[in-house]
Image (cartoon, coloured by chain):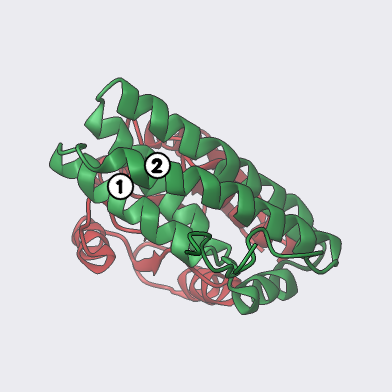
Chain colours: A red, B green
Amino acid sequence: MATILVVDDDESFRIYLVTLLRQAGHTVLEADNGQTGLDLFTSAPVELIITDIFMPQMDGIDLLAALGDHHPRAKVIAISGGYKAMNPRLTLDMASSFGAIDIITKPFQAGTVLEKVSKALESTDSKTERES
Amino acid sequence: MNTVPEYRELTDLQKLNEMKQELEAGFSTVLRHYQAGILHRPERIRQALEEQDAERVAMESHSLKSVCRQVGLMPMGELAAQLETMGASGCLDQAEPLIEQLIASSVQGNHELNHFCNGTTLPRPFFEKGD
């Protein structure tokens, strides 16, 4: 089981993900914007971040960019329903280009989330070890 | 002439059942949070429209769209998507009737979700053809 950080400004989705991941046995931290998420990440041993893309203050792309600059080994799954009539796929492709290792489209199924989380945690690429 | 709209349920019950099975004990708590969004966000969108704040109309509608689609309120999600597009384009001329529809849908949708959560069937449609 792992420590996972959920970043989403929408309380409903945050509660959904937190509930789901805790039921699966993970320790879950939560933040309602990218900046709080970044602060939590730098102060706790987080193994995986699940972040929404469109949020006020620091959004998911800014969070990915900040992590890429200072914590390049951080594992991030991006999640979005698309914005401003933009195809959610394009939004998430953008997240991938900023370093997200996987993407989830809203609306999602719990099984999909758990499967992608397991896959991300099991991956043993260069992002497995957190930099000190 | 009958002007009362034909009743149709707004909720995709299959989607909701899947969510219930997946979340098990946590389902009721999670659904209550979604219901809060469904009830309150349309009013926030209306306030943003009154202030002619197109960006806020887009952001609030974006959030509502995702919330509705997650719990199977697809027609309401479509209304929110249309408002999101209007807000993003900065053209809010046609937004008011959509918001009125959205508010009416939120009441009906919330009613349906309550019945689902309580394990009861709807006592009668909100609108019946020929009422």
Report the chain holding disc 2. Answer: B
What residue do we see at 67% from left, 58% from top?
A: B126
Nearest-to-viewer mark from 1 and 2: 2
Dot 1 alpha-carbon crowd within 10 angstroms: few under 14, some 14 to 19, many 20 or more: many
Q: Quadrant of residue A54?
A: top left
Q: Quadrant of residue A42?
A: top left
x, y (%) of residue A68?
A: 25, 48
Q: Nearer the viewer, residue A35 or A45?
A: A35
* Pointer 1 residue: B83
In the depicted structure, whether residue B71 falls above or below residue A46: below
Q: Are marks 1 and 2 on the same chain?
A: yes
* Label 1 element class: helix
- Would you say the residues marked 1 and 2 are in contact, meaning their CB atoms lie under 8 Å apart? yes
* Pointer 2 residue: B99
What residue do we see at 53% from left, 60% from top?
A: B4
What residue do we see at 85% from left, 60% from top?
A: B118
Residue type at mark 1 is Leu
x, y (%) of residue A79?
A: 39, 59
Q: Which of A83 and B84 is in front in this view?
A: B84
